[in-house]
Image: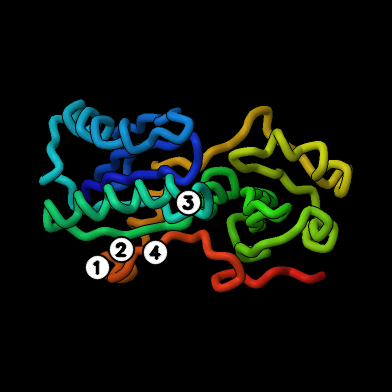
């Protein structure tokens, strides 16, 4: 299967191409809110690099967030357009799930994404399994959720490192730089979903709604 994935939920996006379960290539869109102007040319360049055209793609994939309202919409619109034009299936995957898959195969990994209003999208995996499902929390709720040494990652994790460390002390570890969702892992997740479903998604919706989608943790 040839899969092309788009991930535009944050300021640093990416486009990835997989074939037969292996990553052929991935291009970063370090656009700082300009995904719309670079996304389509990047898709075209990545396909041409491997002697392919949009009609050769067998599954289109897209990251659903949470993250930037505009960025997620840009990615979904582009993916829908490609899927419609080529008559191929489309499937989506959570951008937070993609982050957890990238760093969460061993140990405990927490993903933090700014949800504004002083709150955050938060999820926790341990040894690759969900320990705390994606939900909206305040930083003060973290001591009730994190009880073991945990690596914290996210698109703005360095910005929030001091505040998290102040609440969790030695339980919290941090990468040297911010960690952004990658299209390569969105592709991997959607391929697994497609294999399980036997088809693409009937409906593609962004993950950014507050409380209608997630229950706020009240500790």
Query: Does label 3 or label 1 sit earlier along the sequence?
Result: 3
Q: Is residue 161 visible?
A: yes
Q: Is residue 53 left or right of residue 112?
A: left
Which residue is painted at 29% across and 39% down in the image? 17
- Give the image location of residue 110, x and y in percent: 67, 51
- Give the image location of residue 65, x and y in percent: 48, 53
Mark 2 or 3, closer to the camera? 3
Q: Quadrant of the C terminus?
A: bottom right
Secondary element type, mark 1: loop
Secondary element type, mark 4: loop
Q: Which residue is mark 2?
A: 194
Residue 39 against residue 60 in the figure, above or below: above
Question: Alpha-carbon distance for marks 1 and 2?
Answer: 5 Å
Q: Is residue 157 left or right of residue 163?
A: left
Question: Alpha-carbon distance for marks 1 and 4?
Answer: 17 Å
Q: How is the image coloured?
A: rainbow
Mark 3 or 1, closer to the camera? 3
Mark 4 or 2, closer to the camera? 4
Residue 164 tag number: none
Residue 28 against residue 104 in the figure, above or below: above
Q: Which residue is mark 4?
A: 205
Q: Which residue is mark 1?
A: 199
**Residues packed near mark 1 inside 10 Å, few (<14), some (14 to 19) or many (20 plus):** some
> In which image quadrant can residue 48 be found?
top left
Query: Does label 4 or label 2 sit earlier along the sequence?
Result: 2
Query: Does label 1 or label 4 sit earlier along the sequence?
Result: 1
Which residue is painted at 25% across and 43% down in the image? 19
Pointers 3 and 4 in contact (CB under 8 A)?
no
């Amino acid at each position: 299967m040839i899969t092309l994935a788009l991930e535009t939920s944050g300021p640093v996006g990416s486009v990835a191409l997989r074939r037969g379960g292996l990553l052929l290539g991935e291009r970063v869109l370090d656009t700082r809110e300009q995904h719309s102007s670079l996304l389509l040319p990047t898709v075209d360049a990545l396909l041409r690099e491997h002697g392919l055209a949009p009609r050769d793609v067998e599954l289109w994939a897209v990251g659903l967030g949470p993250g930037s309202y505009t960025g997620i919409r840009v990615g979904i619109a582009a993916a829908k357009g490609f899927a419609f034009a080529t008559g191929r299936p489309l499937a989506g995957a959570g951008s937070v799930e993609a982050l957890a898959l990238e760093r969460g195969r061993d140990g405990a990994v927490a993903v933090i994404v700014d949800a504004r209003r002083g709150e955050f999208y938060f999820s926790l995996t341990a040894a690759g399994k969900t320990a705390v499902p994606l939900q909206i929390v305040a930083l003060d709720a973290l001591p009730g959720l994190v009880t073991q040494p945990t690596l914290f990652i996210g698109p703005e994790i360095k910005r929030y490192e001091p505040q998290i460390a102040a609440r969790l002390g030695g339980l919290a570890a941090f990468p040297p730089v911010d960690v952004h969702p990658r299209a390569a892992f969105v592709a991997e997740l959607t391929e697994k979903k497609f294999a399980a479903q036997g088809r693409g998604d009937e409906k593609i919706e962004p993950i950014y709604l507050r409380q209608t989608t997630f229950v706020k943790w009240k500790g």
